Image (tube, grey):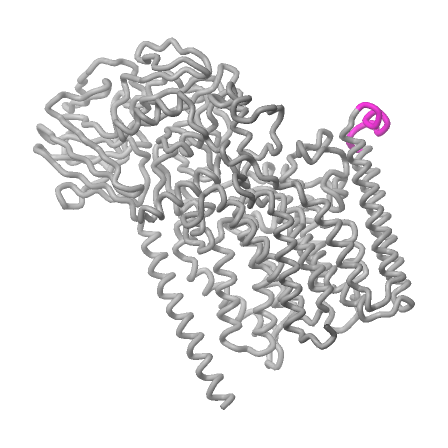
Amino acid sequence: MRNWSKQKWDVVAVLALFAVAVILYAPVLAPGKVLLPADLLLLTPPWAQESETYLPGFTHVLRRAWDPLFQFYPARKFLAESLTQGWLPLWNPHAFSGTPFAADGQSAIFYPINWLFAVLPLPFAFGAVAFVHSLLTGVFLYSYARRLGYTLVGSFTGAVVWMLCGVQVGWQMWQVVDSTLCWLPLCLFFWEGLRESGKAGQFVGLSVSLAMTMMAGHLQFAFYVVLTTVAYALFRPPIGVKFPFLAAFKRTASAVLIACLLSALQIIPTCDFLGQSVRIDVPINRLLATSIPPTQLGLLVMPELFGGEKDYLHQPFLPGDYYEDVIYCGASSLVFAVFALRLKRKGDLSAFWLGLAIFSLLMGCGSQIYKIFYYGVSLYKSFHGLSRIFVLFDFSIAMLAAQGVSIMAEEAPGDRRRTSSIAAGSVLLFTLLMYRVGILNNGNFFEFLLTHKWLAYGMKQLLIALLFIGASAVILLKAPTKLSWFAAIAVLIEMLYISVGINVGSNADLLYPPTNETSAISNQLSDSQDDRVLCVGDPEGRPESRIISNGPMSLGWDDASGSNPLYLRRYDLLIRSINLKDTGSAAPTGQGMIAAAGDPALDSLDVRWIVSPVPLTIESYSLMMSRSVFVYENSRAKGMAWIVPDISDPLPQTVTLPQSLLLSDSATLVCEEQNGRKFFVKGSQIATSNTVICTQDGPNRLNVKASATNPQLLVVSQAYCPGWNAFVDGKQAQLLMVDGVLTGIPLSSGQHQIVLSYEPDDFRLGAYLSCASWLFLMAFFWRGREQNRRFTS
């Protein structure tokens, strides 16, 4: 084995990383499992009442992670169904009475690895995509560390830390976080090649890597990747050029620009959508509230250092939530990282990694430097979760650990005695100090110790951390250089101990199993094609009292509500006004309608079916089913499209009816006259002479057949959004905004065929730019190869 080539040992290391990924994700790759907290459904009706049938012995959920199940599952399901049917889903008709889909960056429909959702069985695809990204995360960092000249064992150690650090593992169910972050070491890998050789292939690799991170679905983490890459390039300027700092700036700026153009079909619509959405301007106080107090920095060592249980994933004594605070990088990793610091060594990278770690520490703890980015970077106000920048701290520790283990393999135990003692001692002191401060900051230590099992669990975590600190110290002080792989084993064991069990597979059969209620509604919807459903809560507004928002989308229903961090701001104003009128509370933005049953606005939004956990006494609601929930049919629902007669021509760009369609409260037809113009403002059906038939032809297209007796207004109960085009009898028509949220089209008398298609100009522009940029980059790469071939020959 001593005669093995470097390439063969690298293959062994990659296979070992493959085995690590298998260990981590085997539970979710097993048949019948899914990387989603599907058991959360058993807390909500109608599944809660029959939880014992679906999961015998059910007592509690394993993961209270709502977003993966109620946001990412329906989005990936919709993406998979659309792609398999040959549609490119630019528009989502299943939530918020219609909302942009491709422009929502987290849909990531242009990110190639996400196309696996359309190829693989959907439950299996969640685990498979997570596994692929976890493996890429480790392989890319290993390759980058090897290019820096680190030893095989050191590179493997750094790859393990990066694969299994808190943000990478804790956020895996969200999909978009790891898919964005995995490209960071590959960006640095290609920059190292570019600074040394200046070859076109390295520039192309850097540009494509940056483009992948921009299309992967999380602009906040993509910003961190770009920021780190640019800072690294300025710290490591090109070799053999006259003005290295200027050359570094020009090359990285060019690569970032090319990456933006390559991903323009995603970036441009997303940036435009942000301007129309509810996330355009997050208040700075709200962002600062998501920072991690310095008293909780012990979480860098162990995720449950201050108490908690992995089965429940909560820390009863700490603010915030587990996933925003899962920032650990491991005790042994910290020891080897501190050992790696050689700040005075020429060409050493530890100064950069230390600076990056300090920067992320200050930002994540909410220091004033955050305001520089908040006020200086336009899109930064749309970001959330200040503590998420700790991922750069974890990355820095991973690279320092790789360097530390590499140095260990080059130095005899006697030469490293002093630095080893300092490294182990400083991490030991930090852990004990942070544990003491964190516990005392959150209550009386002895009271918690005697009355709460969670604190006892935290003390167990502390002892394990101290054990690995001691083991790392012994390895650094005593292990011969040939046994440096002991360090990799120590790090691997600790990181697996922390990480295994965070993402366990739920039973895939729990993903929205059919019930009598859901089956009945689905059968009714299959007959009508164009009706919407609304799931309301109990009088207390408890979220677990109803089918959670986006549950209807997962079932294939159209919903007047929904749950998403990005959707149209004007529609949010409607939802909040309805909530305020019905409950006295507008409810947090993004939570959808909380108790809108009976509101006349639902009639114009075509809400035909209402699912409620409590009985309702509303005149126009007919009880269809009464089991674990109550299902009602609304006789006043206007349909997907209807006609408002006798509208004068020409019309203004925005139409507001005298008595709003959204506020009508009568089931009878009423025709009012104002300023010589007549309006139909109430009623469930328009006159029989005005026939309207509306059908959905894919997610981005509506077909309407309408008959008008004179110039009239066709109203479509779909959220108004720029990007929709209307064609009446083959000719483009004016598109109007009705009552601030709905879509209107003026019609002349006679029978008409109307086609509404969604293809926004920003998407078309982005597609042209992306295609042209990919062609340019391929030509640039081929030209560079030809020039290099002629040079070498």
Query: Is residue 565 a member of the stretch shown in magenta?
Result: no
Q: Position of residue 396 (x, y in %)?
A: 69, 57
The residue under the point 28% across, 21% down is 637
Where residue 282 appears, as percent x and y from the top left, is 53, 39
Report the front residue among 61 and 570. Answer: 61
Q: Nearer the viewer, residue 201 or 12?
A: 12
User: Is-magenta flag for residue 448?
Assistant: yes
Predominant SS of the magenta segment? helix
Q: Is residue 234 left or right of residue 157?
A: left
Image height of 304 relative to 329, above or below: above
Q: Residue at 90% of width from left, 63% of height from top? A: 417
Q: Position of residue 267 (x, y in %)?
A: 43, 53
Which image quadrant is residue 349 in? bottom right
Judged left or right of residue 518, residue 391 is right
Which portion, as a residue range, is magenta? Answer: 441-451
Total labels: the figure holds 0
Q: Is residue 702 visible?
A: yes
Q: Residue at x 63, y 61 (%)?
A: 15
Residue at figure coordinates x 84%, y 24% from the top left = 450
Vertical placement of 502 versus 666: above or below?
below
Q: x%, y% of residue 344?
A: 80, 69
